[in-house]
Amino acid sequence: HVLRTPLQDAIRLRVPNASVWSYSADFIGSPLVLGATNEKKQYDVEAIRQWYGQQGIDISHRRVFFFGDKLANIHPFAEMNFNARQVSCKSRDESHSTVGYCGALPEEIVEVKGAVGCS
């Protein structure tokens, strides 16, 4: 499933490719990206931010929030002045300690500035 909001629906009406998936390492032609490489996801997020800019929607770096379960993906976002937060902190895959089970808890999705790992 893809997050749908009234704003995203309005963009899709103006820009049909807004609901077409892009593949990481290829041309990013929409805000939907598959196959992002660990520790390089920040570059895809920047490409998405630029895509929105091309649609007349300016999003500053400091208003971007990334949520992911791997700590290795969190700190590279800070280098680009993005915010990032590690999620799935209480539900870690026992066989792969660096991976959380799919999905964050609602209380983990917060607008905290900076790069924050699980404590």
Image: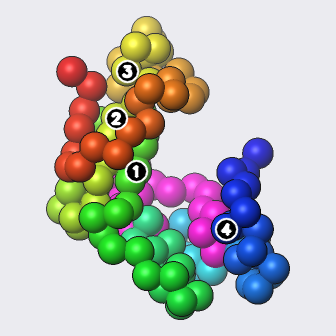
Q: Looking at the image, is mark 2 or mark 4 nearer the viewer?
A: 4
Q: Mark 1 Cα within 10 Å, few/some/many (few <14, many 20+)?
A: some
In front of the other: 40 or 15: 15
Above or below, 8 relative to 110: below
For residue 7, the mark is 4
The location of residue 21, given as percent across then percent down, is 71, 66
Mark found first going from the N terminus, 4 or 3: 4
Residue assigned mark 1: 66
The residues tagged by marks 1 and 2 sit, at their Cα atoms, a distance apart of 9 Å
Disc 1 + disc 4, Cβ < 8 Å: no
Above or below, 71 relative to 92: below
Disc 3 + disc 2, Cβ < 8 Å: yes
The residues tagged by marks 3 and 2 sit, at their Cα atoms, a distance apart of 7 Å
Q: Amino acid at mark 4?
A: Leu
Q: Looking at the image, is mark 1 or mark 4 nearer the viewer?
A: 4
The location of residue 49, given as percent across then percent down, is 45, 74
Quadrant housing residue 44:
bottom left
Looking at the image, which residue sits at the far top?
94
- The kind of secondary structure element at disc 4 is helix
